[in-house]
Image (cartoon, rainbow, N blue to C red):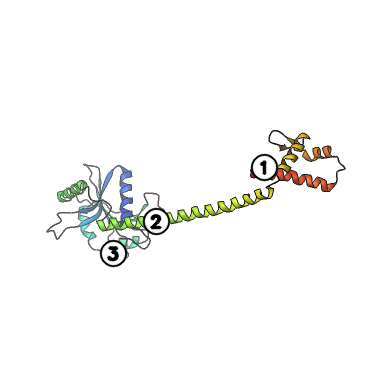
Amino acid sequence: MTNKNGVRATDIKKALSQYHSDSYKSTIFFEVKTGPTYFNSDLLIMDGLAIKKSWKNPKLTGYEIKVSRSDFLRDEKWRGYLDYCHKFYFVCPKGLISRDEIEALDENVGLIYYHEDYNNCRLHTMKAPVYRNIGFPPKELLYYILLSKVDRDKDPFYDSQADYFRELVDKKENNQSLGYAVRGKIGDVIVEQEKENNKLQKKLERYEGKEEILSQVISYLTQKGVLTGWDNILREDWKEKLDDVLGSNLASHEKYKIKNAIDSVEKLKKIL
């Protein structure tokens, strides 16, 4: 089952499992039966039951997960869970159930909110429950916990195979959407790269056929000391050096032509 914000009961179960795994002091089981399945009108199934790892001070914490407002309002089974756990929580997406509602139902019951922004395994305690001394848990409960532990064919986070395959289909659809988005992004990058390549190609076409002219200009400027080094780098004082070589009385339009030739050399070097 999923609520309007997309939170599934399995999301909350996984968060609870992580919380109890991180604590190293308790173990949690899901879909815990209180007795035999057949011919048992009093059978209850708790969404989650955590057991503290202590023989001297046993503590069982029950969890009832709600992702639907209507499910919470019509549910009365949870009261029967209180006989099997020392503490009991409702766990729901943030804001689905208020603290005041829980206190009106039973002041001994706790409330936990689930939200993606919470740091503590996405869980936050809104109301702590009261510890009730129910003694040691019934042997029937412990026996069926043991059976669930050895039932390796059952996924612990899903109520049924239908829920498991439903989420599997949803994940496949989400992965398809991600694939479409990635392919679209790659397409955008390719288009931009093609545009850039076209610009460079046009620049190269402007200089096509002028290699010999540019080669002669480079050779001449190198001989006269305007270009220096094996890679023909312009001197910092190239303008003054060029004036010395060609004469300060050189016509301005002739200097302009030479400057354009030098600029062309520099642009071509950058492209290549």
Does 173 appear above or below 265? below
In the rendered image, residue 270, in percent from the top left (x then y), is placed at 65, 43
For marks 2 and 3 on the same chain, the one whose residue lies earlier in the sequence: 3
Q: Nearer the viewer, mark 2 or mark 1?
A: 1
Residue type of the residue flagged with mark 2:
Gln
Q: Nearer the viewer, mark 2 or mark 3?
A: 2
In the rendered image, residue 23, in percent from the top left (x then y), is placed at 32, 44
Q: How many marks?
A: 3
Q: Name the residue located 67 percent from the left edge and 44 percent from the top edge.
A: 268
The answer to whether residue 8 is left or right of residue 254 is left
In this orientation, which residue lies closer to the viewer: 121 or 162? 162
Separation of disc 3 and disc 1 at Cα? 73 Å
The answer to whether residue 121 is left or right of residue 262 is left
In the rendered image, residue 11, in percent from the top left (x then y), is placed at 33, 54
Separation of disc 2 and disc 1 at Cα? 45 Å
Separation of disc 2 and disc 3 at Cα? 32 Å
Q: Nearer the viewer, mark 3 or mark 1?
A: 1
Q: Name the quadrant containing residue 248.
A: top right
Q: Name the residue located 30 percent from the left edge and 63 percent from the top edge.
A: 104
Residue at which label 3 appears: 71
Q: Which mark is residue 176?
A: 2
Q: Which mark is residue 269?
A: 1
